[in-house]
Amino acid sequence: MTNWIDIAALSDIPKRGGRVVKTTSGCIAVFRTQNDQVFALDDACPHKKGPLSEGIVHGNAVTCPLHNWVIDLETGSAKGADEGQVNTYQIKVENGRLLLDLNQLKTRSAA
């Protein structure tokens, strides 16, 4: 059973941009694509823990600002020659508001 919590307005995140949401178990990066799709995943690149929320969004991917690793926003997997994975989280837009699944956040462990 999902338990949705309101975290922000969709308009709080620029198109092709990201923001960070701080939780008791760590930071989650929330992204908005050019066509208003939204994604949520750990805010730490699997390579050197770079802040993905500060990366460049292109298509359904984000490029880490530290070492240019490309992370798929849908799966959390590194693309191309790089290997690694970050956790993804259920997020949806309802009436212009972003909602995260609280149950997923509760089971998340702080890294």
Image (cartoon, rainbow, N blue to C red):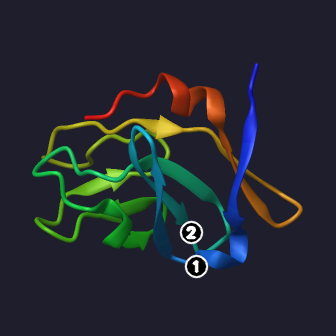
- For residue 33, which numbered disc appears in the image? 2
Q: Residue at x 51, y 76 (%)?
A: 16
Q: Residue at x 52, y 63 (%)?
A: 31
- Give how far across and how far down residue 87 sits, in percent: 39, 35
As rendered, which of 68 and 7 lies closer to the eye?
A: 7
> Disc 2 residue type?
Thr
Q: Quadrant of residue 89?
A: top right
Question: Would you say the residues marked 2 and 1 are in contact, meaning their CB atoms lie under 8 Å apart?
Answer: yes
- 43 with respect to 84 (left or right): right
As rendered, which of 93 and 101 lies closer to the eye?
A: 101
Q: Secondary structure at mark 1?
A: loop
- Give how far across and how far down residue 5 sits, in percent: 72, 45
In the rendered view, tell whether residue 106 sits above or below residue 54. above
- 31 with respect to 35 (left or right): left
Does residue 84 show up? yes
As rendered, which of 109 and 73 lies closer to the eye?
A: 109
The quarter of the image holding the C terminus is: top left
Does residue 55 show up? no
As rendered, which of 27 and 45 lies closer to the eye?
A: 27
Q: Residue at x 63, y 26 (%)?
A: 103
Q: Which residue is mark 1?
A: 15
